[in-house]
Structure formats: structure tokens, C-alpha cells
Amino acid sequence: MKNFILYTMFYTGTALVILAVYNVIVGEDYLFVNHILEIFGASILIGVGITIRYKFEIRNVILEHIINVGYAIFVILAFRIIFKWHTLPVWLLIITVVVVHIFLSITTIKKMHKDTDEINELLKKRREQNKDIRVV
């Protein structure tokens, strides 16, 4: 559940920031509420799909990333067709997905390293405590 919320919020936030920057560059002055809700819906669908995908172990890390990015691109392009986002170029949508995936991967790796260091430190303290307790 935690990963689902993380993916959904991160995809939504990053996509909205990239869309806002794009709108400023092309001269758009506003972003419609329905676009925000559509992006949020796409993010939910991406989050659900990636969370379900994590239930299946893929031993090849590169293949795992390709599947995740491919699925996210598929969802975004499907939403582009369904909601007629024809003013947004396909390359922008693909770059958005790739950038979000890279940020999520880096964040996940940093969190794993932090958690690993914390667990190792707790194990070290536990070993020291057990060493002091042993009396023969």
C-alpha cells in the first residue's frame, strides 16, 4: 500500500510540475482542473499496475525497469487518446514517464541504503549487548 501511495503521489506531482513548465514555455496561462484529475487518474492506474507487478519477481533488474516504464508509457498514451491530450506532444509524455521513473528509482535506492545502514547498526548494537551478557 505504501508503494502504491508513493507511486501515485510522485507521478501526479512530477507530471503536474512538468506540465506546468511546458505550459509556461508554450505560453499557456492556465491548467484545467479536469487535466489535473485526469493526470491523477493515470497516476492511480500506474501505481496499481506497478504495485501488482511487484507481486511477481523478475530477476533481471533491467527487464523490471523496462516493464515498469513500458506500462507507465502505455497508460499515459492511452489516457492521451481517451482524454484527447493532443496538444501535448508524445515525446513530452514519454520524457515525463522516464524522468519520474528515474527519480523514483533513485529515491528507492537511497531509502534501501538508509534502511540497510540502520539495520546493520542495530545488529551491531545487539551483538555488543549479547557479548556483554554471556557469562560462562
Image: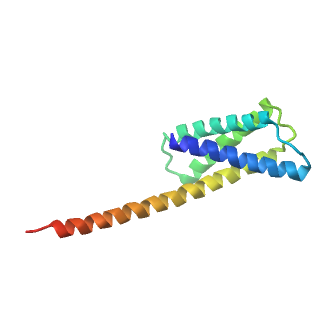
Q: Residue 20: where, in percent of width, then height?
A: 80, 48
Q: Residue at x 54, y 53 (%)?
A: 61
The residue at the far left in this view is 136
Residue drawn at x 37%, y 64% as measured from the top left: 120
Measuring from the top left, give residue 130's x and y in whole percent.
Answer: 21, 65
Which residue is located at x 47 percent, y 61 percent? 114
Note whether 125 is above or below 14 in the view shown.
below
Report the side of 3 relative to 83 (left or right). left
> Is residue 102 at all visible to an observer of this figure?
yes
**Residue placed most toward the observer, 103 or 131:** 131
Q: Position of residue 121 (x, y in %)?
A: 37, 66
Q: Residue furthest top?
A: 82
| The C terminus sits in image quarter | bottom left
Frontmost residue, 64 versus 5: 5
Exactly how many numbered labels are in the figure? 0
When the figure is inspected, residue 78 is found, relative to residue 105, above or below; the finding is: above
In the image, farthest residue toward the right: 27
Horizontal side of 83 relative to 133 (left or right) equals right
Q: What residue lies at 58% left-to-right and 36% top-to-bottom?
A: 48
Residue 30 as seen in the image, left or right of residue 60:
right
Find residue 41 and report its horizontal and vertical position in percent: 68, 34
Q: Is residue 69 visible?
A: no
Q: Quadrant of residue 81?
A: top right
Coloured how?
A: rainbow
